[in-house]
Amino acid sequence: MQRILSTQLSTHVGATVRVAGWVHRRRLLKSVAFLIVRDAAGLAQVVITDPGVRAELEQLTEETVVEVTATVVANDTAPAGVELVDPAVRPLGPAAVPPPFDLYRPALTATLPTQLDNAPTALRHPSRSAALRISAASVAGFRAALDARDFVEIHTPKVVGSSTESGANVFALDWFGRPAYLAQSPQFYKQLMVGVFERVYEVGPVFRAEPHDTVRHLAQYTSLDAELGFIADHRDVMAVLRDTLAGMLGAVTDRAGAALATLGVEAPEVPAEIPAVHFTEALKIAGAPADEPDLAPAHERALGEWARREHGSEFLFVTGYPMAKRPFYTHPDPARPAYSNGFDLLFRGLELVTGGQRLHRYDDYLAALAERGEPVEPYAGYVDAFRHGMPPHGGFAIGLERFVARLTGAANVREVTAFPRDLHRLTP
């Protein structure tokens, strides 16, 4: 008999079926016992009246893996309107050691450190697994949106010979006796691949050694990167990003609607045109000094409130960041060279995406590195490619975990990360 999932039970009323999963909860009443079995799709309620089967159930602990063969009957008060009766219950392994928290409760009440220490079992709770389903759907939507626009998925090295973002900290390692680093981003490689495919994207881990210890930062996270050639300026990149976000949120609604419902959230609408303000105007809106070189978290929150109030939008582009705060490969604004053809996208008052137009001429790279006092040699393999012809291009990078945290309303990005890596955590 082929195993079915809990969500398929309603189509098998009157039939004998086989389900399998984990003991989610046992309720041992005087005349009847209930076994709630959890599988990847949801919950199934098993009704036990036979004394022998009840005695077997009493020996099972929560999270023990079991198989149940039983008859499906309709019951409006049961999960999905059906339940299983006259069961045969067979353990598929030894009795499980229960985790240090109750997974059957609606909310996982353990502290976040306790959850992270016990991640393999904490992630079984519907609230934690729902966030990961939303993450998976987001990636699927990212890929689909860019595939539809003739982007090619690439896979680039995560061990590199020099840092990508000048000035940022990197994780150093020994590469057969030579110094090497974990890649901070696929930036250089995705730019070079524009010279091959014109439009490329990548989904992969990136590593940042900045010693942040905040609710919004991880030392390793998943970056959704895209780069496209033959653009006029950064606004072409912003248009592609807008459509990509709409595709991601559409996929979340279609593929992870149940997960959204579990968390009690709705996917926001992406405006047909996301409102945009120049950095200098953003400082005024946020009440920041005119000489402020960057936006602080409080400024971002103020801008998010302004975007909702003035435009009814959860999203806001801030363009024209000062060149001094952008990487050396950023293209300056031809009309205002002190400012960049770059942007950040704020989602609900938090920086989610960084992007912009890149330099594409070899001589401009030499000048940019010289202006910042950077030697050319560590970047030679990257910069030399621009001697052989590269089109005007630009791109963006979305932090997946930050996107999901903001979408679900999680207070800490670690709540939506399966096995986070940060300043303090290398296990499990």
Image: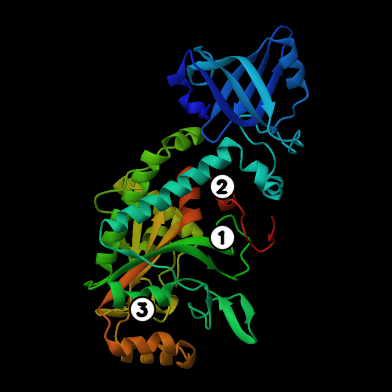
Q: Is residue 332 left or right of residue 163?
A: left
Question: Do the numbered discs 2 and 1 sit on residues whose CB atoms are within 8 Å?
Answer: no
**Colour pattern:** rainbow
Q: Taking 36 as reference, is 290 above or below it?
A: below
The answer to whether residue 343 is visible is no
Q: Rounded to the nearest whole Å, what is the CA distance between mark 3 and mark 1?
A: 28 Å
Q: Is residue 56 left or right of residue 160?
A: right
Residue at (52, 83) in percent of width and height: 162
Front: mark 3 or 1: 3
The amino acid at mark 3 is Leu
Q: Which mark is residue 411?
A: 2
Q: Rounded to the nearest whole Å, what is the CA distance between mark 2 and mark 3?
A: 37 Å
Task: Tell me residue 262's x, y (percent).
Answer: 50, 33
Of 327 and 171, nearer the camera is 171
User: Residue 66's quadrant in the figure?
Assistant: top right
Numbered disc 1: secondary structure: loop
Front: mark 2 or 3: 3
The amino acid at mark 2 is Ala
Numbered disc 3: secondary structure: helix
Q: Rounded to the nearest whole Å, what is the CA distance between mark 2 and mark 1?
A: 12 Å
Query: Which residue corresponds to mark 1?
Result: 217
Q: Which mark is residue 192?
A: 3
